[in-house]
Image (spheres, rainbow, N blue to C red):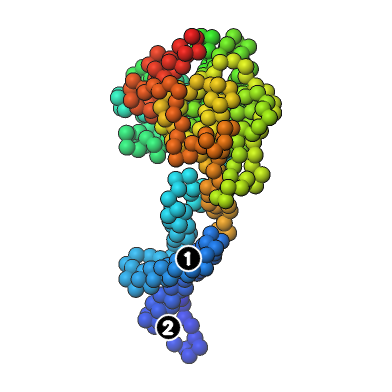
Amino acid sequence: MAPYCFQEVRPLNKKVSLGICIALIAITAAATFSATMVFSKSIYNKLIGNISQRSQMYSSIDEINQIVNNYFYGSTDNNNRINASLSEGYVKGLGDSASKYMSSEQYAEYTARLEGGVTGIGVETAYDYQNDKFVITHVYAESPAETAGLAKGDVITAIGNVTVTRKNYSSLSENLYGSLLSSVSVEYERDGVTKTVEPLLGFSQPSVIGRAEGNVGYIRINGFYKNTAKEFKAEIDRLTADGADSFVFDVRNTSDGSIDYAAQVIDVIVPAISGNIAVAKDKNGEVYKNKIYTAEYSSVNKPIAVLVNGSTAGPAELFACDLRDISQALIVGTKTAGIGTMQEVFTLENGGAILLTVALIEPKNGADAVYDGKGIEPGVNVTLISGDDSNISLLTSEQDNQLTTAINLLAS
């Protein structure tokens, strides 16, 4: 409404005074903020069924609104930010780490990741705290990163012309991922020589990485997405053809993905059984939306070990639990996170969504095997010598005593 300060209104052949102009601006700002509160209430109407609770929440919001209107020094005209903060605050108030509010942009990114996996320039990275360096730990074949000349062991010194430090590496590394077909500037150092390249984003990174460790096939699962089961089976077939007579499946620090897609991966390994490999139960103890998972297809008839740690959560925990109970897999490492629930996405009118915990997961052995809130205790408890779980990808096979323990157990 600010332009009214600079034009004449002539019902009485007089200019609008500065005082009236300011009043109009204030009224407009108040109306805008009120519209924001009304929109936010419409969101909460869907989330809260109890009228008494809803009334109490409205009363609190209105009270805050009054105080803000009377005393807040800053601007209240950012509707999107206020709506997002109110919605995010509500979901956070549930006290459930697996539930979250997503803006429209975050929702689009979440959906793309779940349906297509991670996209980026085609690298895996980790921060080496001991040497204070941001290191490339893996470069995917035929990726833009490989084409640009990046290699495992390169030290990334700057991203987008911003120097990488211990404090900012996590936020800067996000620039290495994304589906937009644009490039990102990466400065790196190798053997004392510094170079800068600009690899393209948009490369679909496999969620599964495999390699041979002697006669043992090692497979790392980074997340359970739509394509994971297909990629996983392809790696098993490849390593088997190369002579693998046993397997180590690594789900340390893995929590991303969905129960639906984890069940598909489990079905690749375990034999067909008469019972279920998992059932989702709602808050009343009933089966949630017919979510009953079975094993019907292929199986891996070889000795198996699964590596886990305190950041193994959600779908990765179901994977480890069912392999232990169906395929007698050895569980090696440290106790898992204990998130044994299912989440579902509910879209909102503002284009965003909430990822909400809707059911408890009962694995193959039923209620007695539920790991939610408890975690899964490994059959062979092994703590990393380094003591730093975030540093796993920087370890060689010899330095990774959890991996070497699993390999030695399979050999014996």
x and y percent of residue 100 in the render?
48, 49
Is the residue marked by circle 1 packed among few (<14), some (14-19), or many (20+) residues within 10 Å?
Answer: few
Report x, y in % for residue 266.
60, 28
Judged from the image, the secondary structure of the residue bearing numbered disc 2 is loop
Q: Is residue 337 left or right of residue 257?
A: left
- Assess whether mark 1 and mark 2 are in contact (beta carbons under 8 angstroms): no
Q: Is residue 57 visible?
A: yes
- Marked residue nearer the N-terminal end (2 or 1): 2
Q: Is residue 200 visible?
A: no
Residue 192, how many percent across, how many down?
34, 19
Vertical placement of 412 versus 159: above or below?
A: above
State the image quarter where residue 302 is shown. top right
Which residue is the site of mark 1? 53
197 or 139, nearer to the observer: 139
Residue 245 spot, x, y in % from top left: 57, 11
Q: For the point 44% across and 25% down, which residue is it?
A: 378
- Does 83 appear above or below 194? below
With respect to residue 229, does 61 lie above or below?
below
- Residue at the bottom extreme of this rendering: 12
Front position among marks 2 and 1:
1
Q: What residue is rendered at 36% in x and 23% in y?
A: 383
Amino acid under label 1? Gln
Q: Which residue is mark 2?
A: 16
Q: Quadrant of residue 130?
A: top left
Type of amino acid under label 2:
Val
Tell me the residue at 31%/28% (across/down).
129
Task: Compare residues 371 and 24 and report the one nearer the observer.
Answer: 371
